[in-house]
Image (tube, grey):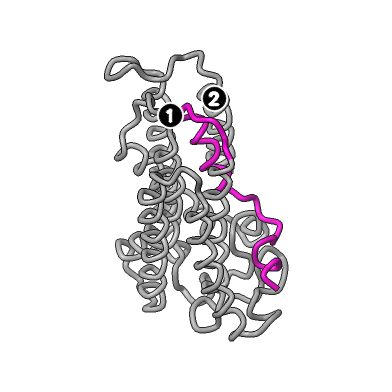
Amino acid sequence: MLSYAVFPAGKRIRPNLFLKLVTLFGAEITPDCFHVASALELLHCASLIHDDLPSIDNDLMRRGKPAFHVKYGVANAVLSGDLLYALAIREIGRVREQEQIPQLLPIISDAHIRIQEGQLLDIKNTRDINELQRIHHLKTSALFEACTLSAYVLRHVQCGVEYEEVKALGTAFGNLFQLLNDLNDSAQTEQYARASGSDIESGRGSVRRFAVEERAGLQETARKELAESLEAVIQKTHSKKNHDEVPPDNVCAGVGELGIRSLMSDFLNS
């Protein structure tokens, strides 16, 4: 039953973002990285199960298939979502570098808390654009921030990127992702997260209710912020002026830059 939620033919954008950033920050991919990547994906899958529930978004389809609660029932959906959240925490506990666990656990648990806060606000069905952006930050950007900040914890000791820059990168990814989710038509949104469009029909949780010009402006701003934030982080990984940072010929950082630029290109060209 859980495999239906965890292997839904998605793109694994969040764990891929995390792994690409680990290499961009000069570190090697180790078994610990996969524990963290798994935790991030489990957290995401749990949020999707609960997001689709009749009392929240009431989505009947997810990536072209029946939503979890449609296939297995509401009770199983609630309990399975809770279980996936717990499994995400357990994955962090399996990290072998014990000194990293106290840094990773608050990141993962904070993302969980903020997702729930976003859900609570979302069901109030706000029509205020500022409140809507806050909901998106909580429900979507929080998990992207967890991806970037987790990679920061596993960074190479000589990486010169700052915490706030990494967090801003996660926020930028999340903001653009949510806008693409909302602004693409139902045929395109299947490649992101939602398929049935119930948010749009109910007028909840989507920017589609706003004027076309306003939507276009939000999307353009989000694209620009992501491009600028990512470029700032990449340049910082090459900088030598603050510390003895990772040298430009560092293999991990080079591979990571190619990967993260490719991922960003997918976002910007969507």
Is residue 16 located in the magenta-colored stretch of the structure?
yes
Q: Which quadrant of the figure contains the N terminus?
A: bottom right
Q: Are marks 2 and 1 in contact (CB under 8 Å)?
A: yes
Q: Which quadrant of the figure contains the C terminus?
A: top right
The answer for how far apart the CA atoms under marks 2 and 1 are is: 10 Å
- What SS does tag 2 mark? helix
Q: Nearer the viewer, residue 45 or 107?
A: 107
Q: Which mark is residue 167?
A: none
From the viewer's perspective, is residue 97 above or below residue 65? above
10 Å crowding of disc 1: few (<14), some (14-19), many (20+): many
Q: Position of residue 13 (x, y in %)?
A: 58, 48
Q: Quadrant of residue 122?
A: bottom left
Q: Which residues are magenta?
A: 1-30
- What SS does tag 1 mark? loop
Q: Position of residue 120 (x, y in %)?
A: 37, 75
Q: Position of residue 164 (x, y in %)?
A: 29, 40
Q: Residue at x 37, y 64 (%)?
A: 114
Q: Residue at x 53, y 56 (%)?
A: 91
Q: Nearer the viewer, residue 15 or 178?
A: 15
In the picture as drawn, the residue positioned furthest to the left comes out as 242
Q: Which mark is residue 156?
A: 1
Q: Which mark is residue 252?
A: 2
Q: Residue at x 36, y 69 (%)?
A: 117
Name the mark nearer the viewer: 2 or 1: 1
Q: Position of residue 24 (x, y in %)?
A: 49, 29
10 Å crowding of disc 2: few (<14), some (14-19), many (20+): many
Is residue 234 located in the magenta-colored stretch of the structure?
no
From the viewer's perspective, is residue 232 above or below residue 105? above
If you read the primary sequence from the N terminus, does the residue marked by circle 2 or circle 1 appear first? 1
